[in-house]
Amino acid sequence: MSNYQRRTKDQLAARVAQDIFDGAVVNLGIGQPTLVANHLPAGREVILHSENGILGMGPAPAEGAEDYDLINAGKQPVTLLPGGAFFHHADSFAMMRGGHLDICVLGAFQVSATGDLANWSTGEEGAIPAVGGAMDLAIGAKQTWVMMDLLTKKGESKIVETCTYPLTGIGCVKRVYSDLATIECTPSGLKLIDKVDGLEHAELEKLVGLPIAL
């Protein structure tokens, strides 16, 4: 067994933020992806969108400075950057469906090797019991990235050959950012972008249970 450290949630958020390009319009999904807002590099302009009708979100507010009239789609208090705007959620969904988002970052229960996404369930305890805006985001954004732990609490890989959860979108996921590795989904299967120090490639493939091209 090799010796390696998993990325913490903040380290994972910083890893995702590193790849978001200057000038990108980005939607951060409910849960872990919202942390990415706190790690965007200084001096890089990234315009954050929320499906409840915000463009130009900033990082989470300081403790004690929360305004619960200013929240994201996950009901978390957020800040608004200079030039930010509020609008009806129908306009927000028009942005999503019209291909105006460069990147969306979503959580997932499962991602298939070819990029199918499953991130909702009616039977999972604590899960959102409807697909919500994820379907529109996954298909509408120019790139869909998933941010998640690689393994379930039972130690099973969330990257699978075929999803067994209800699908949110087919062939839509371009990259999976996980606590152990960053992996690209392609029509011909998985391709490694990077992995944590100390984790052997063969061990990563064993954890996932699928071949991962270098």
Image: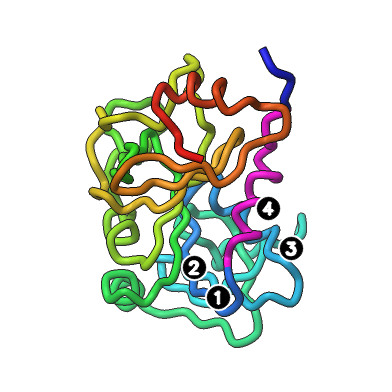
Q: Dots 1 and 3: beta carbons under 8 Å?
A: no
Mark 3 lies on residue: 65
- Residue 174, compared with residue 129, is above or below; it is below
Residue 82 badge:
none
Precedes in sequence: disc 4 or disc 3? 4
The residue that disc 1 covers is 47
Residue for badge 4: 14
Residue drawn at (48%, 70%) of the image: 49
Look at the image and say whether residue 44 sits in the magenta stretch.
no
Q: Quadrant of residue 195?
A: top right
**Within 10 angstroms of label 2, few (less than 14), some, or many (20 or more) residues?**
many
Quadrant of res 21: bottom right
Viewed as shown, does residue 138 lie left or right of 104?
left
Sequence-first disc among 2 and 1: 2
Q: From what the image shows, is residue 90 above or below residue 33?
A: below
CB under 8 Å between discs 2 and 1: yes
Tell me how far mark 3 sits from mark 2, CA to CA.
24 Å
Q: Residue at x 66, y 12 (%)?
A: 1
Q: Is the Cβ of the residue at disc 2 closer than 8 Å to that at disc 4?
A: no
Label 1, secondary structure: give it. Answer: strand
Question: Mark 4 or 1 closer to N-term?
Answer: 4
Query: How far apart in space, not on screen, are marks 1 and 3 (Cα)?
Result: 22 Å
Q: Which residues are the magenta region? A: 5-20
Q: Residue at x 54, y 51 (%)?
A: 33
For the residue carrying disc 4, how many other residues have a C-alpha within 10 Å: few (<14), some (14-19), or many (20+)? some
Dot 3 or dot 2: first in sequence order is: 2
Name the residue: 51% across, 42% down: 192
Instruction: From the top left corner, tell me how far across and down residue 3 is, in percent.
Output: 74, 20
Principal secondary structure, stretch drawn in magenta: helix
- The residue beneath circle 2 is 26
